[in-house]
Amino acid sequence: MLINCPVCNGIKTARSRIKTEIIPYFGEVMETSVVCDICGYKHADVMAVDHKDPVRYEIEISEDRLSNRVVRSQSATVSIPELGIKVEPGPKSEGYISNIEGVLNRFQNGVKQSLILFQEDEAQKNAKNILKKLDKLLTGELKASLIIEDPFGQSNIVGLEVKKRPLTKEELANLKSSFNIIDSNNE
Ligand SMILES: [Zn+2]
């Protein structure tokens, strides 16, 4: 479907796609994407079709769990506290369906970008240190936990070993959230 671009305001220059997929033990999710041919604006998100409650998932990352499915909605905060890394909802955050390995790869790409952006010695040292630890998580030499917190319950980590519980009021208050794709692009 062609829609008007929310960024360059091009008339029907953006292609919008919607796809639904059934995730076992979770339900039906809707993947949406918008790509503008003129300005290159791109946005993707995933959302659950059914109403969900605020939720927190935690799993210990290990080599045999790298292929566990992960659904990350735009509203979710993804973190590995032992490494001090976190991705919060924001203008550039995207929803995706992947697995634990894919989430670690996304963290790697993010840290590699920060190596280019932040040239200070301290930042470089810190980023290289995190990259080493991410490598060790992928090879099973290191253990750490992957946590997904989603105020709209739209995300999921699939697996028998996953600890799932509702978010507390305090956790909810501390989470960032973004409600509107178009507004968040004005930042
Ligand atoms: Zn555009």
Image (tube, rainbow, N blue to C red):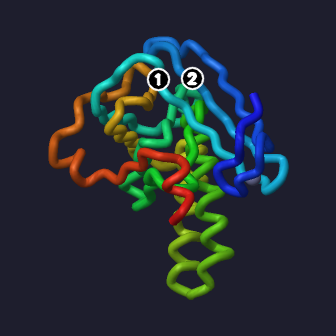
Compared to residue 146, the image places residue 19 above or below, namely: above
Disc 2 element: strand
The residue carrying mark 1 has its beta carbon less than 8 Å from ligand 1: no
**CA separation, marks 2 and 1?**
6 Å
Q: Residues within 10 Å of mark 1 (few under 14, many from 20)?
A: many
Q: Is residue 140 left or right of residue 25?
A: right
In the image, farthest residue toward the right: 37
Q: Residue at x 59, y 28 (%)?
A: 67
Q: Amino acid at mark 1?
A: Ala
Q: Residue at x 33, y 23 (%)?
A: 52
Q: Position of residue 122 (x, y in %)?
A: 51, 84
| Location of residue 33 by image quarter | top right
Q: Nearer the viewer, residue 65 or 105?
A: 105
Vertical arrangement, residue 128 with respect to residue 176, above or below: below
Q: Which mark is residue 30?
A: 2
Numbered badge on residue 65:
none
Position of residue 138 relative to residue 70, above or below, is below
Q: Residue at x 60, y 53 (%)?
A: 135
Side (left or right) of 87 relative to 95: left
Q: Tell me whether the residue at label 2 lies in contact with that at label 1, contact meaning CB atoms closer than 8 angstroms.
A: yes
Callout 2 amino acid:
Met
At 53% from the left edge and 16% from the top edge, which residue is drawn? 23
Q: Is residue 126 above or below residue 47?
A: below
Nearest the camera: 25 or 33? 33
Q: Nearer the viewer, residue 151 or 147?
A: 151
Instruction: Give x and y (percent) for residue 171.
Output: 22, 47
Q: Position of residue 117 (x, y in %)?
A: 64, 76
Q: Which residue is mark 1?
A: 48
Dot 2 alpha-carbon crowd within 10 angstroms: few under 14, some 14 to 19, many 20 or more? some
Q: Quadrant of the N terminus?
A: top right
Lower position in the chain sequence, tag 2 or tag 1: 2
